[in-house]
Amino acid sequence: MEMWLSNGMRLAVLLAAYALLWSVETFIPLFRYQPGRWRRALPNMALAVGVVAVNLALASATARLSAAVTREHIGLLSGLGSRPWLLVALGIAGLDLFAYLAHRLLHKIPLGWRFHRVHHSDAEVDVTTALRQHPGETLWRLFWQLVGIVVFGLPFWIAVLYTALSSLNALLEHANLRMNDRLDACLRWLIVTPNMHKIHHSQQMAETDSNYSNIFSIWDRLGRTYTTGKSCQDLHYGLGEEDDRRSTLGGLLRMPF
């Protein structure tokens, strides 16, 4: 397990998934790409490097916290050490719940939205949008993951596993893929699908304030924030205020300020 969760292995899998989805969405796109795809994608990719760097930089602090809570038997799941598969299932679900709360608060707290709007300002949602995230938002999400680790008493390897699964699902749900509607409707009873998440990137506020879930769609259903929305073909992405200055890496980093 530790071999598969090593930094090098996780990064290799992430890059492979990134490249695969970039290729697939080229041939079966939900929306036809406008000219200048590479020029728009490069700032997104640079921010993605920042997301990975911040996570790696704070990994040791997360590991120490996890070690402390497991050593002291702190947390709601602290007694499940002898049942690893149950601990994995409940631990990942618990961290996903806190990811849902963190995401929802980014939309509801004005300061949070100033940072999160960097992600929502992308007028063409695709696989590169997945990690288009301001470093300030990355720190916010990591904080809520730490809260989840303490509340549930999770070992570090579960947090690493959840981050890997979350990253892969983020790539998939943002990918500009044309997906069968019937298959999507079945899958979204369990997980967040590309079509479900695309609604969240709508310019319409009622649709933006919905479908916050990260991996499991149940949190939106329980939180009454789930919507089927309109057909993805009728969606308009972004904030409606895009300009060339904000499409650069410097412009995206300055956007919250």
Image: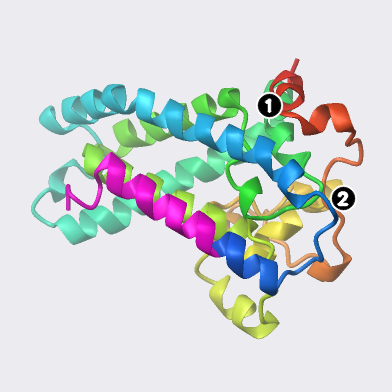
Query: Please, is residue 150 above or below residue 168 in the view?
Result: above
- Per the rendering, the mark at residue 65 is none
Residue 5 sits inside the magenta stretch: yes
**On residue 115, which mark appears?**
1
Find residue 217 and report its image quarter: bottom right
Q: Which residue sits at x=82%, y=29%? A: 246
Q: Nearer the viewer, residue 47 or 173?
A: 47
Report the front residue among 24 and 52: 24
Q: Is residue 168 magenta?
A: no
On screen, residue 110 versus residue 129, left or right, reads right
Q: Residue 83, image x and y in percent?
A: 13, 57
**SS at mark 1?**
helix
Residue at point 26% right, 55% down? 88
Q: Main secondary structure of the magenta part?
A: helix
Q: How many marks?
A: 2
Residue most toward the top? Answer: 257
The circle drawn on residue 204 is 2
How many residues crowd mark 1 within 10 Å: few (<14), some (14–19), many (20+)? many
Left or right: residue 203 versus residue 176 is right
Residue 181 picture location, percent across and down: 69, 80
User: How far from the left and from the top, in percent, is residue 112?
Assistant: 66, 26
What kind of residue is marked 2? Gln
Asked if 230 appears above or below 203 in the picture, the reply is: below
Residue 8 seen anywhere in this rendered image of the structure: yes
User: Where residue 10 appears, x then y in whole percent?
Assistant: 33, 48
Give whichever of 231, 12 is nearer the camera: 12
**Mark 2 against mark 1, which lies toward the viewer?**
1
Give, as a single range, the part of the protein colored magenta: 1-20
Look at 60% across and 33% down and name the residue there.
47
Seen at 17% across and 29% down, the residue is 67
